[in-house]
């Protein structure tokens, strides 16, 4: 379990997170949702120690994350950030291979190569595995970075908007795949996600932030209601049932 | 899997061939019946060729390391004020510590180069990497300011001649006993190959390095140390060789990519090859007189540099 306790964070004088306390459950897919500027990405970067924690405490299985050595933390959690467009000219296979860095520190062994091959297969990158990162599409790149995080084989997988640039089939496959990882391999997944339907259908647990504070959290089917989502995003969202599955209907105003 | 053996093979074959040519060229007679031929070979020809190869290797490696650490394709010691800082170090030695042995001179120059590099990192740390031309622009201005300081000090202390020697990289003065420090650069090249993967990971950016648990500050220390020592070694023994550290890594990156474990041998070899060619041209074009290798490479390098910039723009 990752526990956030009384965490506040500021950029300049602006409060991004204020006195936030919430738990990310183990072995589940947790969707981190909320309107733009709610502090989702900041929370993710504090958990993964990309940004220094100034106030409050974050623990991973009751150990303060600041007590982990960089290498040990890299063996516990992998992170996929939003791509900013500046890439090394690496081949896809080399990039995925760097996901094994925490384990092999630059000297990969046979086991590393097996896992790299699996990751490439799993995310359908075989055909482009020898292409350079700056010569493939945004969606392919996104999958390559997720495959890299997968190859890191950590218990925790943190993804910042993993569906960016993915077409419908790949988005669906990814979400299904993340659920499998959680339910069969006991991996814990946190994903920042904007598509509310993927959040509802793809997650076991939802944590909703608004203005740096917790708006609501809990099991997805219990907390993802018309009322809670409408007030979270300040626009009308109808959660309707389609068969036995919930569906957020929000295009009616257009 | 991508095989790079052919690139390694080409590099080695061309390097050996050019080394042979480089050794054979010169005013002195190197034929078998000249009794002084062996002496000429050992005192002048071999040292010169070795110095060219070591310099080419060290400049190319400095360039590729800086490009990965800064995550910008247009930086190298001469576009970031590093060589100018090393030169200021040499002026300090010439003015206040003239009796220092050459290793001491090198140490002062390297320390100044480290400070110059730290200044550059400080200046550019808030420039977004999405603006690829802004960083070298700032670096060039910064280098220009440091160079101007150096020139002013040199004028005041009447040392402009010294500056002239350092500014244009030239191998005509290389003799046995005057280049051996460059072997340090060879050692540093091996060290860089040993930790090549760390530079590649650093090249993925700070957040990725972080999440992979890379010891970022250690990589920075090795990188900055290598670049500073290499730059000052080259300035002290040969003089400034602009563009080399820029052109070579860019050419290799186009063909082979940025995985330094695979590309470093080719980057190093190609650096030596380009410099050997420049030196050979410089020696032949006005035979028996010489044009400095830096001048020859400056012309070719500037053209390749422009080509890279334009190619990049049409690509993006």
Image (spheres, rainbow, N blue to C red):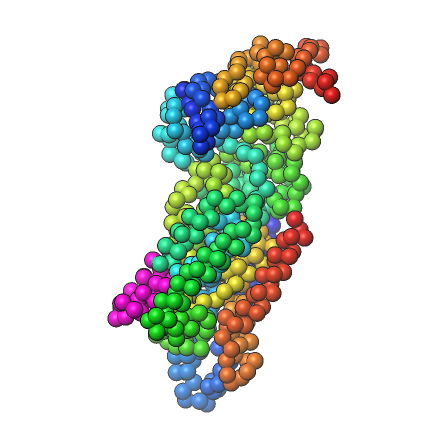
Residue B13 visible, this angle: no
Above or below residue A210? Residue A107 is below
Whole-percent x and y of residue B172? 44, 77
Whether residue A68 appears in magenta in the rendering, the answer is no
The residue nearer to you, when weighing A51 against A65, is A51
Residue B49 as seen in the image, left or right of residue A87: left
Residue drawn 40% across and 42% down? B215
Whole-percent x and y of residue A15? 46, 26
Residue A96 visible, this angle: yes
Number of marks: 0
Residue drawn 46% across and 71% down? B168
**In the rendered structure, which segment of residues is drawn in magenta?**
B86-111
Whether residue B97 appears in magenta in the rendering, the answer is yes
State whether the magenta stretch is mostly helix, strand or loop. helix
Residue drawn 51% across and 26% down? A39
Which quadrant, please, contains the C terminus of chain A?
top right
Q: Which image quarter: residue B306?
A: bottom right
Which quadrant, please, contains the N terminus of chain A?
top left
């Amino acid at each position: 379990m990752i526990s956030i306790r009384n965490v506040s964070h500021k950029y300049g004088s602006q409060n991004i997170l204020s006195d936030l306390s919430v738990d990310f459950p183990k072995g589940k897919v947790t969707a981190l949702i909320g309107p733009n500027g709610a502090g989702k990405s900041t929370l993710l970067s504090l958990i993964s120690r990309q940004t220094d924690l100034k106030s409050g405490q974050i623990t991973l299985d009751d150990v303060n994350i600041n007590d982990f050595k960089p290498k040990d933390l890299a063996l516990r959690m992998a992170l996929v950030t939003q791509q900013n467009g500046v890439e090394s000219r690496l081949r896809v296979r080399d990039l995925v291979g760097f996901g094994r860095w925490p384990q092999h520190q630059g000297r990969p062994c046979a086991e590393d190569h097996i896992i790299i091959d699996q990751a490439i297969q799993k995310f359908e990158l075989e055909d482009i595995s020898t292409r350079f990162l700056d010569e493939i599409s945004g969606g392919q790149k996104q999958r390559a970075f997720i495959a890299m995080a997968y190859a890191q084989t950590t218990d925790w997988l943190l993804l910042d908007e993993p569906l960016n640039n993915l077409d419908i089939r790949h988005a669906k496959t990814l979400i299904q795949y993340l659920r499998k990882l959680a339910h069969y391999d006991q991996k814990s997944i946190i994903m920042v996600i904007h598509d509310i339907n993927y959040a509802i259908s793809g997650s076991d647990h939802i944590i909703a932030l608004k203005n740096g504070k917790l708006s609501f959290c809990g099991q997805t089917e219990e907390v993802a209601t018309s009322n809670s989502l409408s007030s979270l995003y300040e626009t009308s969202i109808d959660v309707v049932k389609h068969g036995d599955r919930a569906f957020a209907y929000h295009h009616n105003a257009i | 899997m991508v095989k790079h053996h052919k690139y390694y093979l080409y590099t080695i074959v061309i390097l050996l061939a050019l080394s042979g040519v480089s050794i054979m060229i010169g005013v002195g007679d190197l034929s078998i019946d000249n009794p002084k031929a062996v002496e000429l070979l050992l005192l002048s020809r071999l040292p010169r060729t070795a110095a060219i190869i070591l310099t080419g290797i060290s400049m190319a490696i400095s360039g590729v390391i800086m490009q990965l650490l800064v995550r910008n394709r247009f930086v190298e010691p001469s576009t970031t004020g590093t060589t100018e800082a090393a030169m200021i170090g040499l002026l300090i030695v010439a003015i206040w510590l003239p009796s220092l042995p050459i290793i001491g001179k090198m140490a002062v120059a390297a320390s100044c180069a480290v400070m110059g590099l730290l200044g550059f990192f400080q200046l550019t740390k808030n420039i977004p990497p999405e603006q690829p031309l802004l960083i070298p622009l700032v670096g060039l201005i910064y280098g220009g300011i440091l160079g101007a300081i150096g020139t002013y000090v040199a004028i005041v202390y009447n040392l402009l001649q010294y500056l002239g020697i350092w500014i244009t990289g030239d191998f005509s003065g290389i003799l046995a006993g005057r280049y051996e420090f460059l072997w340090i650069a060879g050692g540093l090249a091996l060290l860089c190959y040993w930790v090549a993967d760390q530079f590649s990971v650093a090249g993925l950016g700070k957040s990725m390095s972080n999440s992979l648990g890379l010891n970022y500050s250690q990589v920075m220390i090795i990188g900055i140390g290598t670049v500073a020592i290499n730059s000052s070694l080259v300035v002290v023994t040969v003089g400034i060789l602009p563009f080399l550290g820029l052109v070579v890594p860019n050419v290799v990156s186009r063909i082979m990519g940025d995985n330094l474990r695979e590309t470093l041998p080719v980057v190093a070899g190609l650096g030596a090859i380009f410099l050997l060619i420049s030196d050979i041209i410089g020696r032949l074009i006005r035979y028996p007189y010489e044009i400095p290798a830096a001048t020859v490479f400056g012309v070719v390098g500037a053209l390749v540099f422009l080509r890279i910039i334009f190619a990049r723009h049409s690509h993006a």
